[in-house]
Image (cartoon, helix red, strand yellow):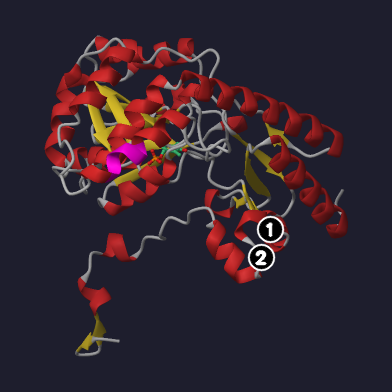
Amino acid sequence: MASVCGMTIENFANNFVCDLVAYEPGKPIEETARELGLDPASIVKVASNENPLGPAPMALDAIRGAAEQMHIYPDGGGYKLRTALAAKNDLNFENVILGNGSNEIIELLCHSFLNKNAALIAAEHAFVVYKLMATLFGANYVEVPDPNFVHDLDAMAAAVTDETRLLFIANPNNPTGTIVDEETIDRFMAKVPDHVVVVFDEAYHEFLTNAPDTLKYVREGRNVIVLRTFSKAYGLAGLRIGYGLGSPQVVNILQKARQPFNTNEVAQRAALASLDDVDHVNATVENNAKGLAFYEVAFQEMGLEYVPSVANFILVNVRGGDYVFAEMLKQGVIVRAMRGYKLPDWVRISIGTEKENDRCLSVLKGVLSSKGSV
Ligand SMILES: *Cc1c(COP(=O)(O)O)cnc(C)c1O
């Protein structure tokens, strides 16, 4: 190891970076297949809330069509896609920012608003990236308890101090799949002061039947940004494209913090085409609703505790998440263990196709019965 007077390079890096535990994504199919000596096609990955139906057919056409233009830089301003997103959401072009996944916009928010004297507020079982980012920027991470896995917006509002800059509401939240309703949000927004940017992370928005209207706060010019993505219902996780819908003053700041070509041309074109492929989104949402119902019934029959979900995944208490993850993996089914969320008894299962759900459930049942807890 390279060292200076017995010290390693780590001694010279920022502590808040070295002390981070890197984000652990769902285990990739190829890696699992290699390790188990299995055919990748035989593996069921229900670990990262991806769309089991794949990208939209219209997006696939756009991706193929884009190939020959790859010697040209992308449209750094994202004109066509931002215009389409603004129109779809009854907003203006200036309200829209594109990101390399909505995760990049989370990072841009932290870049723009956090420092060692600033704080980010999130719920105890919120999406883990908020904590990683707050830590990365040396800021104070304030975690508010979420009884029954539901964000407690009254407690979150009460946690705001002079140093609070960002407050994240994942709605629905990942990994819990729970939602807060519009009335609760309205009560919260009446209390939150103007020095705080409220971030509604709506990665699973398309799956909702009765989505709370948060864009009204964007139209009112509040210090709000709504994050959405093409990674989930639109099935473009591999292309990395998401967006933020915010008031112009918030979006302007973020535009300064991003790289000039932060989203690539293939992603922009595929995303634009996806917006028109309404049939694909509808099929995705329908498949998801069936899959959620399938798991809920099964878990009830098996006597397993689970969190009722409105998203495309479900959190279930298997009384040993690491064990169940590892045993299911051996049989080619990849779920997500939840120790990283301080839920060591639980796994999160993404909704798959009917066939994938059947396979996942039968493997889970087998693992639990040989473990002797069902
Ligand atoms: C999946 C997810 C995202 C989306 O990430 P991308 O970077 O757009 O792929 C954002 N927030 C939450 C809560 C998520 O679960």
Q: Quick one: SS at disc 2? A: loop
Label 2 or label 1, whichever comes before in sequence order: 2
* Residue at 28 percent of width and 34 percent of height: 268
**Residue highlighted by disc 1:** 332
Mark 2 nearby-residue class (10 Å; few <14, some 14–19, many ≥20): some
Q: Report the magenta residues as a range.
A: 63-67
Mark 1 nearby-residue class (10 Å; few <14, some 14–19, many ≥20): many
Q: Tell which of 56 and 182 is nearer to you.
A: 56
Q: Position of residue 103 (x, y in %)?
A: 34, 41
- Relative side of 67 to 176, left or right: left
* Residue at 46 percent of width and 41 percent of height: 127
The disc labelled 2 sits on which kind of residue?
Leu
**Residue highlighted by disc 2:** 38
Q: CA distance from mark 2 to mark 1?
A: 8 Å
Q: Position of residue 167 (x, y in %)?
A: 34, 31
Q: Position of residue 354 (x, y in %)?
A: 71, 35
Position above or below: 333 against 192? below
Q: Quick one: SS at disc 1? A: loop
Does residue 367 show up magenta in the picture?
Answer: no
Q: Position of residue 119 (x, y in %)?
A: 29, 40
Q: Respond yes or no on whether mark 2 lies under 8 Å from ligand 1.
A: no
The disc labelled 1 sits on which kind of residue?
Gly
Of the four image quadrants, the one with ligand 1 is top left
Q: Quadrant of residue 187?
A: top left
Q: Tell which of 263 and 102 is nearer to you.
A: 263
| In contact (CB < 8 Å): disc 2 and disc 1 | yes
